[in-house]
Structure formats: C-alpha cells, structure tokens
Amino acid sequence: MSRTIPVQKNEYIDVLFEDLTHDGAGVAKVDGYPIFVPYGLPGERAKIKVIKVNKGYGFGRLIELYEKSPYRIEIAKEDLHKYGGCQLEHISYEGQLKYKENQVRQVLTRIGKLEDVKVHPILGMDNPWHYRNKAQVPVGEKEGKLIAGFFKPRSHEIVDTDESLIQIPEINEAVQVVKEICGRLGIRAYNEESHKGILRHIMARYGQKTGELMVVIVTRTADIPHRERLVEEIVERLPEVKSIVHNVNGKRTNVILGDKTTVLWGNEVIFDYIGDVKFAISALSFYQVNPVQTKVLYDKALEYANLTGSESVIDAYCGIGTISLFLAQKARKVFGVEVVPEAIEDAKKNAALNGIENVEFEAGEAEVVIPKWYEEGNKADVLVVDPPRKGCDEALLQTIISMKPKKVVYVSCNPATLARDLRILEDGGYKTVEVQPVDMFPHTTHCEAVAKIMLKVVTPK
C-alpha cells in the first residue's frame, strides 16, 4: 500500500524545524514526511509554502517566523547572502560551529555505524570573515556596463557585487579595480549565448603571509584590446600586484580556465606560507583557500601521525605536496602520489623551494602506485589520505586493508564520505580512535575533519 503524501503543492502550513540538512536547509516534518526549507533553523516555528512535492520528501519556502532560534542573526547584505555562497550567514558563528560539529557526529553514527568514536569540539576561527585568498569572478554586461559578481542559484544570471564578505579585502579590491579599468577601456564582456565578447572571468590570488597579489584575466580571444594600457593601470592601482597573467579560454564551456596561459607582467608565481613551509602558487595551482585553518588542520594531522623521525609515510592524494612537506619535517621518508601530473610537478618544486629532500613524488592513481611501492618493499608505517569530496577510491581502501599500515590519518572535506570510508576500514581490521572537526569555510555548509585510525591488535588465542 503506497503512502499518502500529507501536503500539497502551494499549500501554506505551520511547521516546527527539527534539524538542518547537509546544505543548511531547515527540516520540518508533517506526519513523518520531511520538507526542506532554506533559512529555517532547528527549534523555530514558522509558516511555510510548499513549493515542490516528491514521493519521499518536499521543498518549501519560508513565509513567516513565529518563534526564532537564539542562533538566528540579522543578515548584513541580503544579496551577498543569497548569491555569495554564504549559506549559513543567518546563523551566529557559535550556531554554525554547533551545527557542523553535530553534522560530523550524526554521519559517523548514521552512515558509519560508529557509536563510540570520540568527536572533539570543532576548531573554529577567531575571525570568521574575509578569509578566502582566491576569487574567480564571472563578468557580464548590464545596460552597457561591465558587471562582475556571483551567479544566482540555478542560473547564469550574474549579480553585480562590489565585495564578498568571505574574500580577503585585497581580493575584493583587485576584482573591482580590474573590472573598472576594463570597463573604461571598452573591453567587452563575454556573452555565453552568442559566444562573442572578450572578458570571461577576473581571477585574483593573494598570499596572506607575503602580501603578494596575482591577477588573472580570462578571455575568449588571444588578444586583449589596449593590453599595454590595461597592464599599466593595474600595476599603478594595485601596489601589491606581483604577477599579471592572461588565460585564454575560447571554448563554449562552463570550465573557467583554458589551456593557454601567459604572463603579461611580473612573475609566473606568487608565494605564500602555511606554517613555515613556503609554496609557489601559479594561476593553475591548487592551493588551500584558507591557509590559517589549513595550518590548524595539518597540525592536527601531524599530531595524529605522531611521528618520531623513524617512520616511512605515504601521502595518498598529495596534491602539490602541502601535507607531504609538513609530514617530511618529522618523518624519515615521505612518499606522495597524486593523479594530476601538473600537481606532482608543483609538489617537486615546492620540496626544492623548502630544501626538503626526504620526499618522493609520483604521478598516478593511488590504488595503482601504492601497491607497486609495497611490492618494492615500501611498507609504510603511517598512511595519510586527503581525498576529494567523493572520498577514497574503494580500491585504495582495499589496498590499505591489505598493506596493514599501523596507522591511517584521514583528512576529509566531506563528513558523509568520511563516515562511509571509516566503516569500510573498520570492517577491514581498523579502529577509528578519534575525529577532530575543523571549520575551514565559515558561513558555508562545508566542514573538514581529521580522523585517527589504528590497526587493531589481534591477540592470539
């Protein structure tokens, strides 16, 4: 017998929000039927309008609040809240941290079936604003003028904004200066529909420790009108700039950067530090967008690895070597593997930049390269994984279970896939000892975590 849906589309109903989803929407239930409503907070009573009904769940719009959560705060700029990626800006920072910590606890229990794992209080930021060191801003036109900002949700309509509350101020300034200069010089914005126009994106990167700025101008065409004047004015207006780069993307695509990149002025890279480790950052480099919290995250990973100087360590998904170089300061030898060859080249350069010699990097799939290393006699004492949001490849998890390193440190950017992978490792003979949530991206729904995992000691009968 099929279940009757207790609500109808366009119906107005009074609800109590019980929880938040992984993307920050409030969860209300009508006779057990969940309805997801953006901006609703647990404990709040409200009137909502049902806007979509599916078999197992529905969606609603918040109409009126009867009782507010103590964590609800006024939003500084409504447009930035709606379109700037700050899904949790209507929640106090204390409330955000509570939500994220609770999210980690819930998925470990619900998905990982891990009831007795110690989850520490989340590590937040002292100042949770203006932390992002990189912006990639789409450019368009409105009433004959250049606009740059954020896409409206589920659309390609650009909302013109003069700042982002989570970008470093120097990044905000750089984007506005380049937009203003390009507009004055008559450089037309790219039009997706007609595939005409020139300027597609303005990108900026900033080294928080060094104060160095990179500007990347992304165009459809190989030529930029008034290029010399554009470069001259950027250098004049932005004294922090050390690199101006031109990237050409002539394809009909949503991908931001194209294949051809040239330096128009200054250096090919800027530099920044995470802790004492120096990194060279090019236009194409992957680099953590919040280096302050990255240091917090990596310090915890290093603590969980508990290296004495005698260990061999494998860093799967090593990227440009960020964690590898941290580990190398305490380990006998670190081996890093990453599927992107360009990232491996960056990792080797960063090792040389810091004079770190006890590291080796290899390009390839972790689940292929690590068994090869194992056959060659590299039996790692500690294995560190820092996978993308989809989590570890199952073949890699089975490789870990077969190799049996004494300790695994799992750095996660998605609590749900972390919980799933921990369950697989637990079933393969490991024990999750503790988990430390870290807030890398305040005012968004993203939450990072580090897990300490030990090989179970089997007592002979």
Image (spheres, helix red, strand yellow):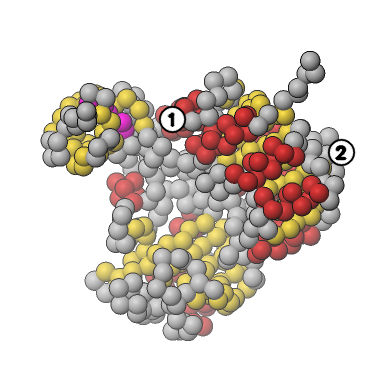
Q: What amino acid is found at the position of numbered circle 2 in the picture?
A: Ser
Q: Nearer the viewer, mark 1 or mark 2?
A: 2
Is 425 rendered above or below residue 267? above
Instruction: Residue 240: name its quadrant.
Output: bottom right
Residue at the extreme front of the image, as rendered:
1
Identify residue for label 2: 310
353 displayed left or right of 12: right
- Name the residue located 75 percent from the left edge and 56 percent from the top edge: 361
Which numbered disc covers residue 358? Answer: none
Residue at image location 47% in from the left, 84% down from the top: 223
> 167 or 459: which is nearer to us?
459
Q: Residues within 10 Å of mark 1 (few under 14, many from 20)?
A: many
Q: Is residue 29 magenta?
A: yes
- The magenta span reads 26-30
Amino acid type at image mark 1: Tyr
Q: Residues within 10 Å of mark 2 (few under 14, many from 20)?
A: few
**Residue 134 locus on image (x, y percent):** 52, 57
x%, y% of residue 359?
A: 80, 52
Residue shown at 52%/46% (left/top)?
390
Q: Is residue 27 visible?
A: yes
Hey, which quadrant is residue 214 in on the image?
A: bottom right
Residue 99: numbered disc: 1
Residue 93: give x, y in percent of width and height. 44, 33
Asked if residue 78 is among those painted magenta in the image, a careful observer would answer no
